[in-house]
Image (tube, helix red, strand yellow):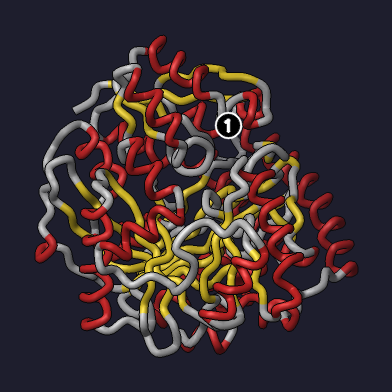
Amino acid sequence: MFKKILIANRGEIAVRVLRACKEMGITGVTVYSDSDRSALHTRYADEVYYIGPSPATESYLRIEKIIEVAKKCGAEAIHPGYGFLAENKEFARACENNSIVFIGPNSKAIELLGDKIASKITMRKAGIPVIPGSDGPVKTEAEALKIAEQIGFPVLIKAAGGGGGKGMRVVRKRDELATAMKQAIGEAESAFGNPVIFIEKFLESPRHIEFQILADNYGDVVHLFERECSVQRRHQKLIEEAPSAIMTPELRKRMGDAAVKAVMASNYNNAGTVEFMVDKERNFYFLEMNTRLQVEHPVTELVTGIDIVKEQLKIASGERLSLRQEDIKLNGCAMECRISAEDPENNFVPSTGTITALIEPGGPGVRVESGVYEGFTVPIYYDPLIAKLLVWGSTRQEVIERMKRALDEYLIRGIKTSIPFHRLVMENPEFVSGNYDTTFIDRVLGKIEYKKSNHKVAAIAGVIAKMLEEKRVSVVSKAKSGGMSPWKYAGLQAQLRSRLNF
């Protein structure tokens, strides 16, 4: 096993990997930019190194700088987390060329699976169902029109080297095709430096279901069952759960076998996720493979009891998988709400600033993966995800009720967050029934009504806050003079704080 690992990331995922390192007796090293000098991951790490200005292009995306830090600190391996350089073949190759272990798949697998056209061809050859569409890049409008008419409208134009909804356009009519192609090509070039596009059939109202896999360096592969990821906004996942509400033992077996076959066909190693689209008739199709740890990996950890990050480290160090497929069992249900620094009442615009108050939920079955703390200033330069709230329960209904309770306990002040949005989703009858798909958010978002601020209550709160501050000064004075014990003082403070939480 490694003695020292560099985590080339920030925020909650850096903290998550550092925790695994600490439990395994590994020295955890991390990096930081100007905006992250006092970030939580820098406080948790055993060693920290400065890598540049706040913009990611000048810090977290600088391959040569991160390799330099790894050499300087003597790290044997680098964990990329997710985002930034996690799926960058050049970064994986740089690690290989410098005799540093990349904790993830080899660079060839990243290159193959990062190209959506090449990966679809590979899966088709392996006998895995893929969505009907072009066999390769589409270069002209005439070619695109011919394919679209063969498979039938609506169709989906996609960037070959992209993800996250960028370079993607739905085309429902013939006369929309030319404009959509130009837009997709331009966006793909801007976002990924790769203007190549392809076309596939657009599935109406599908479910997005992914299978977590683990593969060692000796050809052993297992899957850790599925996660439902259909609650999305602009192709970005917001809520994930396991197991899927539509899954049957027979469908799970077929999809799990296909996921394992996909891994073996691409000579893949370490942790990854095979993503599928499932139509109304429960036919499934290979969508893509994410060659990294997923944001939602803790959902699977909660229902299987397997620490995926620790398994990553073991595989990367050369150990064989100790897990066999028949030994992996599903236990209960789990759900994740992504807590982002965005204003859901204002079209989810980013919200930055200093967190002036923070109380995280707890209790049975609650897990918080956070990268922030009270007093931390959320920077403008990075993804707005600041934390993940997860709950476990014996049934899906218990999970929903527990999530509602945890969301009610979650207090973040100073910035806007997605917590109010998640509270409303947990009350939505369609979501509660489990009968939802990837169109769910688009259909219900316009119907969501947030509770408006009550200015009278705010004014009263201000008066009470002033009174409590005067009371606090008096209490501190008494405590210092021996009139009140520190324990009693702390209890009174907690009671007063709870009264302010309207």
From the viewer's perspective, tell me whether residue 497 is left or right of residue 86.
right
In this view, the residue in front, 38 or 7, is 7
Q: Position of residue 477 (x, y in %)?
A: 70, 34
**Helix, strand or loop at mark 1:** loop
Q: Residue at x 32, y 61 (%)?
A: 123
Q: Position of residue 16 (x, y in %)?
A: 41, 42
Give the residue type at disc 1: Ala
Q: Position of residue 421 (x, y in %)?
A: 65, 69
In this view, the residue in front, 237 or 185, is 185
Q: Which residue is mark 1?
A: 39
In this view, the residue in front, 92 or 138, is 138
In terms of image quadrants, where is residue 496?
Answer: bottom right
Q: Position of residue 344 (x, y in %)?
A: 72, 64
Quarter of the image for the C terminus: give it: bottom right
Dot 1, how many residues are within 10 Å of its Cα: few (below 14), some (14-19), or many (20+)?
many
From the viewer's perspective, tell me whether residue 33 is left or right of residue 283.
right
In terms of image quadrants, where is residue 391?
Answer: bottom left
